[in-house]
Image: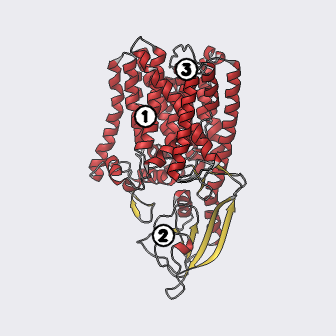
């Protein structure tokens, strides 16, 4: 399927673009752009084939394991994610397409990192090829959109087995196929775009924003009959909803909307969006230079005002000053979004006066970008880098569209790309280092602490849960079996732990602090780093001198008459 998809994407014909910066070599040899996408996917994916399972990887793999047992009931197994076992239907917030994709690998290789990450490399390749196709169509064949998306910290760090890069890849592929179908009046390609959009929705529900965006594209091209093909994606979603009703008696999507567990305040999601966008796409200086050359002083002044309001609003909402790193990303993200969205929407006025293909394309990309960002602000429970990854596709295309063909501007883009790539791989290495603390300690504890007849219990999830379970340890629950006297109890300090049993008699016997070598943190509340959940003063990554990654404490469970420790005293909520 992936080979056929790549061949179809490669067939997309480009339209001439009068004002973007095309690349002559790429335009003369269009296959070079496709190969660039493939090579970038390998450059991003291959160094992290052995990356430890991290954050929500554990849930994706749990669903995949259940699929190997019962393919028709992917969410019917239980998982202890927040303190007590509950069904995956209640705990996971996304549909199971990626888990279906990984299920054969799990069945054949178990929980082995390299084979699973090698399978996920397919989505990076799809993203690279789809970006090349979209760049040929919307950016004059320029390599810059491909480079800036594939080498974004959001993509490079997210080389996990989670659903976020797959969503971006399938969304970009669906758009490329559908656009080719509309432009060439080939309904099979438009149908293929609708089907791939359906797979995007079955990857994450937020993929649904692509449906109205594709319908809008058909209408803007004056080919209204093709506007029906994106609705095929909703048919795919409907089949998933039918499975929910038959197996669980209710819709998974409506259950999530009713529960809204752990929802963060709107202001947190709003300001975190600009912080995240600014930290993941380093295109603002080039945009400023482009608009300054094109006499866009008024637009630049408005962008500066928008950036100032973003910083002021964030400080007001957070009730205090913010650090320079937070301020930098908030300002750059808000200004970047303004300079991309406002000109794109302003292009719509030309559509009412004349048939303007460039205006229609810019308006389509702006609407697509607004859809992704709007969904993450208004409908997602909390903001995170992974929720913004699909927005990078239209954002990069829009940015390159507005830039004139000037040699010195290419130099600026090259410098910005080098800086972005350097940051991306440095942050990815730091995230790898942090994730590896859980894998390494689980294996060390299995070797040193596990003995026949002696139980080892633990708390916490994320990747730590996967490795602790693989080591044969037992996960504690707030209302489940309790550790017997003499058992060992392992408590990581920073991993999310959920609710746990009260009143255990514990005596600490060991403590190990894991320190990193890279002065960057991706998940550390003490310095405000939270790549996978950007709330409050948190940022996707933080440059810091703090080198502590995690602290593991090992306790021995005592008898009832021994000194008891409360949850607060041994680091539990």
Q: Nearer the viewer's eye, disc 2 or disc 3?
A: 3
Secondary structure of the residue carrying tag 2 is loop
Residue at 51%, 77% (x, y): give it: 566
Cα–Cα span, label 2 and label 3: 54 Å
Q: Does residue 420 appear left or right of residue 267 in this picture?
A: right
**What is the number of callouts on the image?**
3
Q: Is residue 462 visible?
A: yes
Residue at 54%, 49% (x, y): give it: 315
Residue at 62%, 24% (x, y): give it: 143
Q: Which callout, 3 or 1, points at the residue further toward the start of the chain?
A: 3
Q: Which residue is labeled 1 in the image?
A: 371
Q: Which residue is labeled 3 in the image?
A: 136
Residue at 56%, 77% (x, y): give it: 454
Cα–Cα span, label 1 and label 2: 41 Å
Return the residue nearer the eye: 259 or 355.
355
Q: Does residue 515 appear left or right of residue 79 in this picture?
A: right
Q: Which residue is labeled 2 in the image?
A: 476
Q: Does residue 56 appear left or right of residue 226 in this picture?
A: right
Asked if 414 appears above or below 98 in the picture, the reply is above
Q: Which callout, 2 or 3, points at the residue further toward the start of the chain?
A: 3
Q: Which image quadrant for residue 378?
A: top left
Q: Position of residue 255 (x, y in %)?
A: 32, 51
């Amino acid at each position: 399927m992936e080979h056929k998809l790549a061949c179809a994407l490669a067939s997309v014909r480009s339209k001439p673009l009068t004002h973007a910066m095309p690349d002559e070599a790429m335009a003369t040899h269009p296959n070079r752009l496709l190969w660039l996408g493939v090579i970038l996917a390998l450059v991003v994916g291959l160094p992290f084939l052995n990356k430890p399972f991290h954050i929500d990887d554990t849930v994706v793999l749990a669903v995949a394991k259940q699929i190997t047992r019962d393919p028709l009931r992917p969410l019917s197994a239980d998982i202890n994610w927040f303190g007590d076992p509950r069904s995956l239907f209640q705990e996971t917030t996304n549909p199971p397409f990626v888990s279906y994709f990984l299920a054969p690998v799990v069945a054949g290789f178990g929980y082995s990192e390299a084979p699973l990450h090698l399978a996920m490399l397919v989505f990076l390749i799809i993203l690279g090829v789809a970006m090349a196709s979209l760049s040929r169509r919307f950016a004059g064949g320029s390599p810059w959109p491909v480079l800036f998306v594939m080498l974004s910290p959001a993509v490079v760090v997210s080389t996990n087995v989670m659903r976020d890069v797959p969503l971006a890849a399938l969304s970009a592929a669906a758009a490329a196929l559908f656009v080719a179908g509309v432009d060439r009046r080939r309904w099979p390609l438009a149908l293929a775009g609708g089907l791939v959009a359906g797979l995007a929705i079955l990857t994450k529900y937020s993929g649904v924003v692509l449906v109205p965006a594709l319908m809008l594209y058909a209408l803007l091209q004056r080919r209204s009959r093709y506007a029906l093909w994106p609705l095929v994606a909703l048919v795919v979603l409907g089949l998933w909803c039918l499975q929910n009703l038959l197996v669980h008696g209710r819709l998974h999507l409506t259950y999530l909307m009713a529960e809204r567990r752990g929802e963060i305040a709107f202001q947190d999601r709003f300001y975190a969006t600009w912080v995240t966008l600014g930290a993941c796409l380093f295109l603002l200086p080039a945009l400023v230079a482009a608009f300054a050359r094109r006499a866009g002083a008024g637009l630049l002044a408005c962008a500066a005002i928008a950036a100032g309001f973003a910083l002021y609003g964030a400080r007001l909402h957070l009730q205090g000053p913010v650090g320079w790193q937070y301020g930098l990303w908030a300002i750059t993200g808000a200004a970047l979004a303004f300079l991309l969205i406002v000109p794109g929407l302003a292009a719509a006025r030309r559509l009412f006066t004349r048939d303007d293909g460039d205006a229609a394309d810019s308006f389509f990309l702006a609407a697509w970008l607004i859809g992704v960002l709007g969904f993450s602000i208004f409908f997602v429970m909390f903001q995170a880098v992974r929720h913004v990854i699909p927005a990078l596709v239209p954002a990069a295309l829009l940015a390159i569209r507005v830039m004139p063909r000037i040699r010195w501007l290419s130099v600026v883009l090259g410098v910005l790309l080098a800086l972005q790539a350097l940051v991306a791989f440095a942050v990815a290495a730091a995230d790898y280092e942090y994730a590896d603390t859980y894998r390494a300690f689980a294996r060390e504890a299995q070797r040193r602490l596990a003995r026949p007849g002696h139980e080892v219990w633990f708390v916490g999830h994320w990747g730590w849960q996967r490795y602790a379970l693989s080591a044969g340890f037992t996960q504690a629950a707030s209302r489940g079996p309790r550790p017997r006297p003499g058992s060992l109890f392992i408590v990581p300090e920073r991993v999310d732990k959920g609710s746990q049993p009260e009143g255990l008699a514990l005596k600490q016997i060991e403590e190990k602090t894991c320190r990193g070598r890279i002065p960057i943190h991706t998940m550390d509340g003490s310095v405000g780093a939270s790549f996978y959940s950007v709330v409050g003063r948190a940022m996707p990554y933080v440059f810091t001198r703090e080198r502590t990654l995690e602290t593991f404490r090992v306790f021995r469970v005592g008898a009832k008459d021994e000194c008891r420790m409360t949850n607060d005293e041994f680091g539990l909520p």
